[in-house]
Amino acid sequence: KPRKGENKTMQTKVNAFLKKLNKTLPKNAIAVIGGSAAKGTWLKNDYDLDIFARFNLAYQNEEISSMLQKALAKLFKKSQIEILHGSRDYFQIKQGKFTFEIVPVLDIKNADLVVNVTDVSPLHASFVINEIKKKPKLADEIRLAKQFCKSANVYGAESYIKGFSGYLVEILVIYAGNFEKFIKLFSNIKEKQVIDFKNYYKNKNVFDCMNISKIYSPLIVVDPVQKDRNIAAALNKEKFEILKNASINFSKSPSIEFFKVKKISLKNLKKSGAIIITAKPVKGKNDVVGSKLLKVYDFIKRELEENDFILKDSGWSWEKEAIFWFIPKQNVISDTKIRIGPPLKSKHNAAAFKAKYQNNYENKGRLYAVIKRQFKEADKFIKNEVLKAYFIKDNVGGVYYEGYNSVSRKRRNT
């Protein structure tokens, strides 16, 4: 929870920013604070702030992104304004440790009037604020849940995380009643469980009513503000299972350790016997850059698995650099493997298989061949084959093999 001094500093900074911006915005448009800062659910040392530039519905046929950009241009240099592309372009401005994301929205009063998906965001904030007004202790209960999710590495709905958004955590805690009940909920949760505490689909099957793209996720949480929206649509099964297991483990043995964010370090990974790769991200919007890094991680993992290197564990993290790690059950596998061929009755294909593979044999009407592996060591396979793939070079600015079970690990740029 932020200390009083931190709260005061944030409020001063936000108020000054809003005062300047509101002087340059067009008539019938106003900038307001949104997100966790508006709801009183933000975590200490988190200085990413959402600002909504709310335009009157009279502007619904206007390019409100361009109008907002012009207003910002009167206050900041072009180099200070980063344009982020979404359903509507929005903008990012960094001032010291504070990062402001300024989003243009139409000032709608209910979700039925939504023109763009972002228009409903201020309504989300209003809903949570009103719930906290009824039960002020909810704010800190939500903070506990958010920190728990951060520690479990499942916090964030970005495409490269596919976890729990801040709004989703807030709604789940409001639904459960407090943090402990949130833990109990997730300790017993079932895949494809529906949470609809506004009872929009009380006498209906939500799976028949919602678009299939919105119910593809392992959890369906009906947005209390917008009934045709699943707040958990971005969540994947992996993050769902991680939070469930973390909740079960916490229930069995509660500990402060469940709230500590563990930073991944090369030093600790080297002790675990991991194959470690670091990558320099390309420049760009976090969501795009993160998606590229995730693709590289998935590519390396898939290459290992398709070449019979079974993994005990793997993962990745990203701050200034990205770190990918892979812990194989066996770094060295057999010299040879069995290649499955065609059935003998397929004479043309069988003849071609025999011509290609000298060391072949028959078993139960099918051909097989014993072939020599090109790589039998996982670390050498990654270093000498996988990291040279153009797919990797197209998605990262530079990749480095950090080594495997070696005392000396000098960086070598591939």
Image (cartoon, helix red, strand yellow):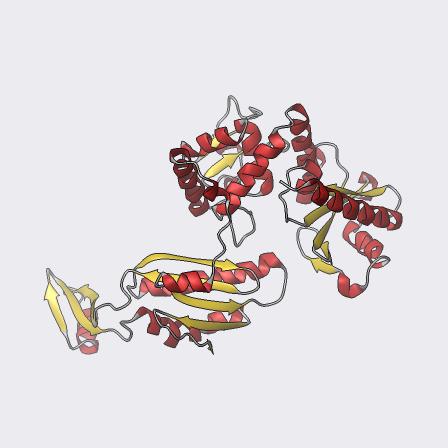
Q: Is residue 58 above or below residue 303?
A: above
Q: Nearer the viewer, residue 399 or 145?
A: 145
Q: Is residue 305 above or below residue 220?
A: below
Corner quadrant of residue 169:
top right
Residue drawn at 48 percent across, 31 percent down = 194
Residue 101 location (% of width, % of height): 71, 51
Q: Nearer the viewer, residue 68 or 364?
A: 68
- Is residue 310 in sight in this rendering? yes
Horizontal side, residue 354 vs residue 114: left or right? left
Q: How many numbered marks have been drawn onto this rendered protein structure?
A: 0
Q: Looking at the rendering, in which quadrant would you find the N terminus?
A: top right
Residue 408 location (% of width, % of height): 39, 75
Corner quadrant of residue 362:
bottom left
Residue drawn at 21 percent across, 65 percent down = 340
Residue drawn at 76 percent across, 60 percent down = 81
Q: Nearer the viewer, residue 402 or 78?
A: 402
Residue 368 location (% of width, % of height): 16, 67
Q: Nearer the viewer, residue 200 or 123?
A: 123
- Is residue 116 in sight in this rendering? no
Residue 51 location (% of width, % of height): 74, 46
Corner quadrant of residue 388:
bottom left
In the displayed orientation, state which residue is furthest to the top.
203
Residue drawn at 82 percent across, 42 percent down = 30
Q: Is residue 396 above or below residue 64?
A: below
Horizontal side, residue 174 vs residue 26: left or right? left
